[in-house]
Structures are given as C-alpha cells and as structure tokens.
Amino acid sequence: MAYVSQEMKKELAPGIKAVLKKYGMKGSIGVRNHSTLVVNIKEGKIDFSGNYTHGDRYIQVNEYWIDDHYAENPTARDFLNELIAAMKGPNYFNDDDAMTDYFCRSHYTDINIGKWNQPYALAA
C-alpha cells in the first residue's frame, strides 16, 4: 500500500529543492492523504503557455506522458522528468499489476503547475 510520511518528505525535499533551484522555479512540497507526494509549482522561468489544460496557467501534470506532451518544450520536459526522479527518490518501487487489480508502490507523485485558485506566474 502506498504510504508517504512527513519524514520521507523531509528526506526527499533536498533533491526536489535542488531541481527547482536548477531551473529557477518556486514551489511547495506536501503530502496528501498519507499516500501522495505533491509538488505545486507557483512561479518560474519556464514558459508552459502551450501546455495549459485547465483554463489559464494551470496544469495537472500526467507523469506518464511528459515526454509526449512536452516534446516541443525540451526545457519543461527535462525539468519535469528530473523533478519526478527526485520525488521518487532512491527507495521508490512500483509493483503495480493492473491486469490482476493489484497495486503496490512506495508512494504516488503529483505535480501541479499553478493551482485552480492561483495561476502559475512566469518570472521575467
């Protein structure tokens, strides 16, 4: 069963913050329902304007389609792939088997670019 604690978040935070700093992004790290590690990107230097899916300046990133959805924006693609890797960390595992309805992983990951009530701000 997926589980992420505040201690696990603290262990993963330095790697996540290093990726955010490398790309000039500002965001917050949180835990939702004790199973999902969430990073909310508030502002940064990467232009996501061609990828907004929920109105103005808001994206719920699908981690399985990063390479396809951000193929035309290599900086965004590289940032999101590095961020996912940092969020998973060295102890991540995924033994899911959808064919038998068996789901077993260390934790889930979510990335939001902006929020429904606070849009992403492109920094100058």
Image (cartoon, rainbow, N blue to C red):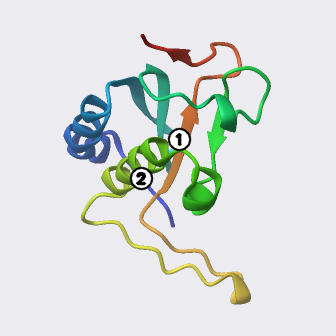
- Identify which amino acid the numbered label 2 is placed on: Ile
The answer to whether residue 107 shows anywhere in this view is yes
x, y percent for residue 28:
41, 25
Q: In the displayed structure, does residue 108 sit left or right of residue 10?
A: right
- Identify which amino acid the numbered label 1 is placed on: Ile
Front-most of residues 119 and 91: 119
x, y percent for residue 110:
54, 45
The label on residue 26 is none
The picture quadrant where one finds residue 118 is top right
**Disc nearer the start of the sequence (2/1):** 2
Q: Residue furthest front?
A: 72
The label on residue 111 is 1
The image shows residue 40, relative to residue 33, as above or below, that is above
x, y percent for residue 120:
57, 19
Separation of marks 2 and 1 at Cα, in angstroms: 8 Å
Front-most of residues 112 and 5: 112
x, y percent for residue 59:
66, 34
Residue beneath the point at 53% across and 28% down: 47
Whether residues under marks 2 and 1 lie with C-beta atoms below 8 angstroms apart, the answer is: yes
Q: In the displayed structure, does residue 69 sit left or right of residue 8?
A: right
Residue beneath the point at 56% across and 79% down: 96
The image shows residue 63, relative to residue 116, as above or below, that is below
Residue beneath the point at 20% across and 38% down: 14
Label 2 element class: helix
Q: Quadrant of the C terminus?
A: top left
Crowd band around label 1 with a 10 angstrom C-alpha radius: few (<14), some (14–19), many (20+): many
Q: Which residue is mark 2?
A: 84
The picture quadrant where one finds residue 117 is top right
Label 1 element class: strand
